[in-house]
Image: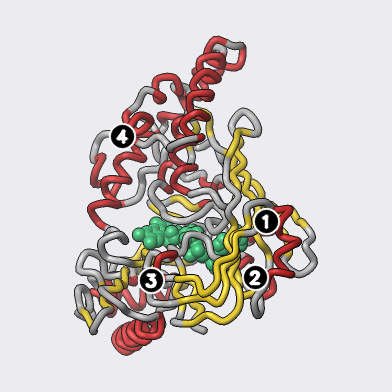
């Protein structure tokens, strides 16, 4: 049954908690129900709402937003998983780790739904979704046709995909498939702290118990004969790799500066350990949206050709720049905002977090218009100082 909510409050459905309402929100619990949605629209179709952790809405959104509410995930092979769009991303990550599957640990604790993850090719701590992505299935809003999008079709890049292009914004992602790396020591990992501390609730817990049985069966089966274990273990402890996408079963990636600083001369022994460290770092560095409502990074880190990046570095020697592929460098938008003296600055109910300069916060009853006006002020100041135009990361829909 479609769940129809008129005059839906968007402040409680978004991590920024901006004051706002939409004429109608329809929650769809099964792909087969999509055909009924057109008859249930109020005004026009205005797009998708996941968990609202990367969205800025204005005070009154005319028309109808859709929320995909079908959930669940499963293993569809030795080390491949399928996850439905309405699932919580972080629950999927934790479940995969509890299954002894490596690959999503760096993407721990990213808020939001599975369906939104490919939209901006979520990334963190040196890893992007695209690195373990196989394919997704989507349904076109107008024709209701289904299409399988391969990795190439999705055209992933830094915080972007083909689904951000106007031509592709009418695709509704139904489920995704990911290729992970089965760990040699899954039985041991299942007894790890993350497995016991962060078990998903309800039906997920029973899935976990089922998987626990499956794991012990696997360990005694021909699946994991000694040479298999040996090669998996070898792949697993090798540490940082430069292979990227070419090896979806590549090892733990702890090259990111915060992780290198944490591990120094040691290395994480398991994906669970790395995930836990990332959770700790994220908790200490990023403001909690429950306390300071925010949408994570509000601006993209600018990506420049080597020549332009090095020229800027010559003008601002303390500016951090990071090689990104052979021909580009990535710059730190947070550093630039900080240099403009904006970290911790407030203007009424909106401001830049004192914890992280890339995060804009709603300190009270701010509206989307107020936040965007404030963001534009930041863009102007950074442009005047560094000659670069920052771009906004979240989806913005103001009316
Ligand atoms: C505290 C915090 C930390 C964050 N850290 C990170 C981070 O480290 N890395 C990172 O990449 N992001 C990060 N984000 C941003 C956010 O978590 C991701 O962008 C996430 O994928 C958004 O998911 P959502 O369901 O909340 O999306 P929403 O905000 O609801 O929607 C975002 C976009 O996805 C589209 N969409 C949603 N569902 C579907 C669907 N089924 N089919 C088609 N389109 C759909 C919407 O139309 C919209 O364009 C952070 C956000 C917060 C609040």
What's the distance in space between the residues labelled 1 and 3, CA to CA? 27 Å
Per the image, label 3 sits on a secondary structure element best described as loop
Residue for point 52% across, 25% down: 211
Q: Is residue 204 above or below residue 149?
A: above
Is label 2 or label 4 in front?
A: 2
Choose between 382 and 264: the one closer to the eye. Answer: 382
Q: Position of residue 143 (x, y in %)?
A: 80, 66
Dot 1: element: helix
Mark 2, Cα crowd under 10 Å, few <14 / some 14-19 / many 20+, is: some
Question: Which residue is found at the position 63% from the left and 61% from the top?
Answer: 155
Question: SS class of the residue under badge 2?
Answer: loop
Please name the residue that numbered disc 3 is placed on: 298
Of residue 275 and residue 264, the one placed in the foreground of this image is: 275
Q: Badge 1: how crowded within 10 Å, few (<14), some, or many (20+)?
A: few
Q: Which residue is mark 4?
A: 267
Return the disc, 1 or 3, that comes first in the chain's sequence. 1
Q: Secondary structure at mark 4?
A: loop
In which quadrant of the rendered view does residue 267 lie?
A: top left
Name the residue that disc number 1 marks.
152
Residue at 36%, 43% in the rendered image: 254
Dot 4 surroundings within 10 Å: few (below 14), some, or many (20 or more)? some
Q: CA distance from mark 2 to mark 3?
A: 21 Å
Note whether ligand 1 is within 8 Å of mark 2: yes
């Amino acid at each position: 049954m479609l769940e129809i909510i008129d005059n839906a409050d968007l402040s409680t459905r978004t991590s920024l908690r901006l004051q706002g309402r939409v004429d109608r929100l329809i929650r769809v619990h099964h792909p087969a129900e999509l055909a009924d949605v057109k008859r249930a629209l109020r005004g026009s179709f205005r797009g998708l709402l996941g968990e609202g952790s990367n969205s800025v809405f204005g005070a009154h959104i005319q028309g109808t937003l859709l929320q995909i509410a079908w959930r669940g995930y499963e293993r569809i092979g030795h080390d491949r998983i399928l996850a439905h769009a309405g699932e919580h991303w972080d629950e999927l990550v934790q479940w995969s780790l509890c299954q002894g599957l490596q690959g999503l640990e760096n993407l721990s604790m990213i808020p939001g739904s599975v369906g939104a993850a490919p939209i901006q090719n979520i990334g963190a701590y040196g890893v992007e979704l695209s690195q373990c992505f196989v394919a997704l299935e989507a349904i076109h809003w107008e024709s209701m046709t289904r299409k399988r999008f391969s990795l190439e079709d999705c055209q992933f890049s830094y915080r972007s995909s083909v689904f951000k292009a106007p031509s592709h914004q009418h695709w509704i992602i139904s489920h995704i498939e990911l290729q992970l790396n089965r760990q040699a020591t899954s039985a041991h990992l299942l007894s790890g702290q993350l497995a016991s501390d962060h078990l998903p609730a309800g039906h997920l817990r029973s899935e976990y118990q089922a998987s626990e049985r499956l794991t012990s069966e696997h360990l005694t089966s021909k699946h994991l004969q000694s040479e298999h274990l040996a090669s998996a273990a070898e792949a697993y402890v090798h540490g940082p790799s430069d292979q990227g996408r070419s090896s979806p079963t590549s090892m733990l990636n702890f090259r990111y500066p915060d992780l290198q600083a944490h591990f120094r001369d040691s290395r994480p022994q398991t994906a669970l350990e790395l995930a836990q460290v990332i959770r700790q770092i994220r908790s200490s560095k990023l403001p909690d949206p429950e306390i300071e409502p925010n949408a994570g990074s509000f601006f993209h880190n600018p990506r420049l050709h080597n020549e332009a990046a090095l020229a800027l570095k010559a003008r601002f020697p303390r500016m951090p720049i990071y090689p990104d592929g052979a021909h580009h460098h990535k710059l730190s938008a947070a550093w630039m905002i900080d240099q403009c003296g904006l970290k911790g600055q407030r203007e009424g109910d909106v401001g830049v977090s004192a914890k992280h300069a890339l995060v804009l916060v709603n300190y009270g009853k701010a509206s989307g218009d107020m936040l965007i006006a404030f963001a534009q002020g930041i863009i102007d100041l950074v442009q005047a100082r560094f000659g670069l135009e920052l771009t906004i990361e979240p989806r913005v829909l103001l009316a």
